[in-house]
Structure formats: C-alpha cells, structure tokens
Image (cartoon, rainbow, N blue to C red):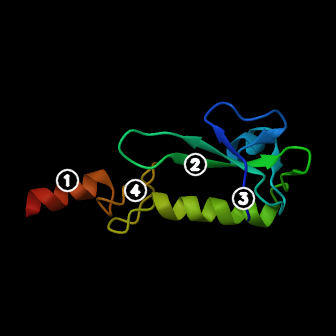
Amino acid sequence: MGALPVYRWRLAPDGMATRRQLRALGLRPGGQEVAAQLERPRRRRGPLVAYLYRIDRAKPVRPMTPARMAALAAAMRARRTCPECRTDAGYCIPRSLGMCVPCSDSFTAAA
C-alpha cells in the first residue's frame, strides 16, 4: 500500500467513502486498493483510522442467493436455539450465559 493520503476526520474529499458508506449506497470496494485514510485524533491513545475507497471504482453489492439466504437463516436459528432445553428462545442466546435466560435462572437457582 505505499504512502496514503491522510485526511482529518470529517474532511474527506468528495468521491471517496468508507466501507460502511459504500454499503449504504449499495456498493462494495470490489477489490480496489485503499485510496486514502481518515484519522480521528484521541487524547490518550493512537488515532482512530478509517480507510477510504473511490466511489467511481466501487462495484454493486452481489445479490443474495437462495442458498446464502438459507445458510444465514440456519445460522441465526442456531444462535437462537438453547443447548439445554433445545427450544427456540426467540432471541440470540447471550454468549455470556451459554443458554436461554429461563435455563440460566433455573441453573443458578439450583446451584
């Protein structure tokens, strides 16, 4: 990546965007190199850095295929299924608990 132009936070030139900004426009970097970077200074640590890509070289986001949609649905279903009671909790199981809240409550009450 050589020497990149560095811009202060909120002072990026027109025609450049971060990954999130590209995604909001329905675009993706599409294999292009990083064109510049933004730096946001912080008091006690190093600056926050965001990479910028050229909008004119960005490509459209690939459409969601039925197979990718099914895989995403299966992954989310696995995140909602409690390993203890094997039911769909209706929310993503907290990793800190490792089980749904009712199972966690009964587990801590028994201990």
Circle 4: residue type: Ile
Q: Tell me residue 70's x, y (percent).
A: 71, 63
Question: As drawn, is 101 to the left or to the right of 74?
Answer: left
Circle 3: residue type: Ala
The disc label shown at residue 93, or none: 4
| Chain-order first, disc 2 or disc 3 | 3
The image quarter containing residue 75 is bottom right
Residue at the disc numbered 3: 3
| Chain-order first, disc 3 or disc 4 | 3
Which of discs 1 and 2 lies nearer the camera? The answer is 2
Q: Tell me residue 74's x, y (percent).
A: 61, 64
Question: As drawn, is 14 to the left or to the right of 100?
Answer: right
Along the viewing direction, whichever of 92 and 50 lies nearer the viewer: 50
Residue at the disc numbered 2: 49
Question: CA separation, marks 2 and 3?
Answer: 15 Å
- The relative height of residue 104 versus residue 56 in the rendered view (above or below) is below
Mark 2: secondary structure: strand
Circle 2: residue type: Val
- Residue sitting at 9 percent across and 62 percent down? 110
Question: As drawn, is 111 to the left or to the right of 6?
Answer: left
Circle 1: residue type: Asp
> Is the residue under label 1 in contact with that under label 3 (CB below 8 Å)?
no
Mark 1: secondary structure: helix
